Image (cartoon, helix red, strand yellow):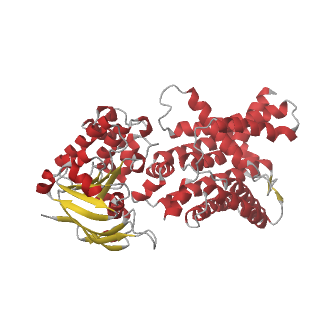
């Protein structure tokens, strides 16, 4: 198994009086789909934000492909780690069109196809690519994103960010803002794309159904600490009652 | 009389338009309320007047005037990002300080500029409005190319979400400096043109200019886009620049019409102010405009 991400006794304190994450240690292998559960304030989002360097960890080490994350430039990190959450406006430019968002994201990648081809050819290629995800998206390239529904925006975020294969996909409660039916649809779509692309993924969620149904490993957090881990075998045996006991 | 108002308003609009285009870049593209343009408008006129009257060549005087505007724009960006000052306050502070700087540059409150070598006083023998129209078309074409380019897209992205621009690895401070620099360069250009056409430069000439510019941009964008049936939500650089022109032209038409109707000039600002209140009050912008770059600076 190839080790992709390693956290060694990682802590995060925003000031001297508060510790939000404490001594978190975790090894993530290539192809892992780890589901992270825990109550509000348990440290799930903090863990994600330390990995994508939105927060700078106060103690311990975080290494991505054997290189400390602080040694990555912003651009390198943006290429290697993709983070999506329930707030699409934090991942995409909602005032800009689908095509403009695609152009901006393509600028982050040195080997981008749109850099080599003309704008028209790139738009045609984008439409073909988006058709695999959602026909409406492929036909509305010039439409600003705030005219799309929440579900369509979430699918678009997946489509545009996963146009280039990231090393690590971080999903921070990405279905929380959606209605239950759309959330189920997006979660199935998420699982499908992770399997097809063989992505390595860490996903936080409040849905215990999703936590049990998806992923090959599970972490439970409470008060900023990892209190329970389950591998594939153990995860299959878990019940909702177990998760409620561990997390809440 | 009617034709005179139309042509006079057109000429005034074309001289004022670069400032409105500068405001378009800060207010609409970067989504910042930068009032610095009121000061850099005067700075452009001041540098040009001082250098021209101390026997520098006219072209060199214009280049230095434009550079002056650009440098102030960059300085305001530093105030916003490094000193973490809210964009609105940074602009007000800049205008406050520019009053002294403009006085220092000119050495006196007013410099007369009546000289037959000055471009806008001779306009190469063609009618001034014709010369200005050709110049404006070239300027708008250049801006359109910029807005449609990679840099233009990043500037618009910066206005949409500065946090994300930074997260994607773009140097957001550099692009903000570029945007504000360009905005203030255009204001300085308008100042140079005003000084040339009016035949003088004065430290008072920038009063209320930023507000008029914002008003004109909002009026133009709202009116023109409300008339569009399709594609009104799609970005078009050409349409937006045209909207700026229409907004400025409507403002100067109203100004000239009010003066021609015999209105006491004392009440002019009150009437025009009320016109701006009407259009700004129906603007679709949120009350938090111009705050996000300051907040970004505070996070870092």
Left or right? Give the position of A134 relative to B224: left
Task: Work out whether residue A167 can be spotted.
Answer: no
Q: Position of residue B252 (x, y in %)?
A: 74, 37
Furthest toward the top, the residue is B229
Left or right? Give the position of B148 relative to B184: left
Of the 4 image quadrants, the one containing the C terminus of chain A is: bottom left
State the residue at coordinates (58%, 38%): B284
Asked if A115 appears above or below A26 in the picture, the reply is above
- How many numbered circles does the render carry? 0
Viewer-nearest residue: B83 or B118: B83
Viewer-nearest residue: A171 or B277: A171
State the residue at coordinates (34%, 45%): A157
Q: Position of residue A24 (x, y in %)?
A: 28, 68
Viewer-nearest residue: B208 or B199: B208
Task: Work out whether residue A70 can be spotted.
Answer: yes
Viewer-nearest residue: A216 or A225: A225
Q: Position of residue B84 (x, y in %)?
A: 58, 64
Left or right? Give the position of A171 relative to B90: left
């Amino acid at each position: 198994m190839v080790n992709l991400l390693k956290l060694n006794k990682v802590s995060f304190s925003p000031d001297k009086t508060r510790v939000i994450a404490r001594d978190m240690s975790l090894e993530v292998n290539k192809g892992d789909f780890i589901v992270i559960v825990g109550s509000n304030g348990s440290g799930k989002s903090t863990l994600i934000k330390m990995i994508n360097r939105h927060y700078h960890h106060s103690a311990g080490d975080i290494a991505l492909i054997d290189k400390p994350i602080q040694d990555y430039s912003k651009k390198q990190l943006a290429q290697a780690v993709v983070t999506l959450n329930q707030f699409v406006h934090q991942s995409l430019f909602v005032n800009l069109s689908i095509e403009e968002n695609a152009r901006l994201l393509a600028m982050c990648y040195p080997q981008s196809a749109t850099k080599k081809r003309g704008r028209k050819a790139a738009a045609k290629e984008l439409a073909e690519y988006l058709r695999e995800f959602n026909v409406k998206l492929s036909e509305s390239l010039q439409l600003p994103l705030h005219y799309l529904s929440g579900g369509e925006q979430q699918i678009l975020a997946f489509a545009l960010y996963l146009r280039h294969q990231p090393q690590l996909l971080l999903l921070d409660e990405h279905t929380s803002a959606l209605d239950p039916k759309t959330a189920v649809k997006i979660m199935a779509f998420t699982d499908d794309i992770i399997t097809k692309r063989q992505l390595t993924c860490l996903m936080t969620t409040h849905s215990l159904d999703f936590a049990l149904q998806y992923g090959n490993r599970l972490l439970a957090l409470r008060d900023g600490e990892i209190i329970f881990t389950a591998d594939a075998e153990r995860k299959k045996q878990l019940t909702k009652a177990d998760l409620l006991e561990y997390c809440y | 009389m009617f034709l005179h108002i139309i042509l006079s308003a057109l000429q005034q609009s074309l001289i004022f338009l670069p400032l409105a285009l500068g405001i378009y870049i800060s207010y609409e593209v970067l989504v910042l309320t930068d009032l610095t343009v009121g000061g850099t408008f005067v700075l452009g006129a001041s540098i040009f007047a001082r250098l021209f009257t101390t026997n520098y060549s006219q072209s060199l005087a214009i280049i230095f005037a434009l550079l002056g505007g650009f440098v102030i724009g960059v300085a305001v960006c530093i105030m916003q990002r490094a000193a973490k000052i809210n964009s609105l306050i940074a602009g007000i502070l800049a205008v406050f300080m520019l009053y002294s700087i403009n006085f220092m540059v000119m050495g006196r409150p007013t410099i007369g500029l009546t000289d037959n070598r000055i471009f806008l006083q001779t306009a190469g023998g063609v009618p001034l409005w014709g010369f200005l129209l050709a110049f404006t078309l070239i300027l708008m074409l250049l801006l359109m190319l910029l807005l449609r380019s990679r840099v233009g897209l990043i500037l618009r992205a910066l206005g949409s979400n500065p946090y994300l621009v930074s997260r994607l690895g773009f140097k957001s401070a550099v692009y903000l400096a570029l945007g504000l620099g360009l905005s203030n360069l255009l204001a300085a250009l308008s100042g140079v043109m005003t000084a040339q056409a009016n035949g003088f430069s004065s430290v008072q000439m920038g009063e209320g200019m930023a507000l008029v510019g914002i008003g004109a941009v909002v009026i133009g964008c709202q009116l023109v886009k409300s008339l569009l049936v399709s594609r009104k939500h799609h970005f078009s650089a050409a349409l937006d620049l045209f909207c700026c022109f229409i907004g400025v032209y409507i403002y100067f038409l109203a100004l000239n019409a009010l003066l021609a109707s015999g209105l006491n000039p004392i009440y002019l600002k009150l009437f025009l102010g009320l016109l701006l209140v009407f259009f700004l009050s129906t603007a679709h912008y949120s009350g938090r405009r111009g705050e996000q770059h300051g907040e970004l600076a505070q996070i870092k």
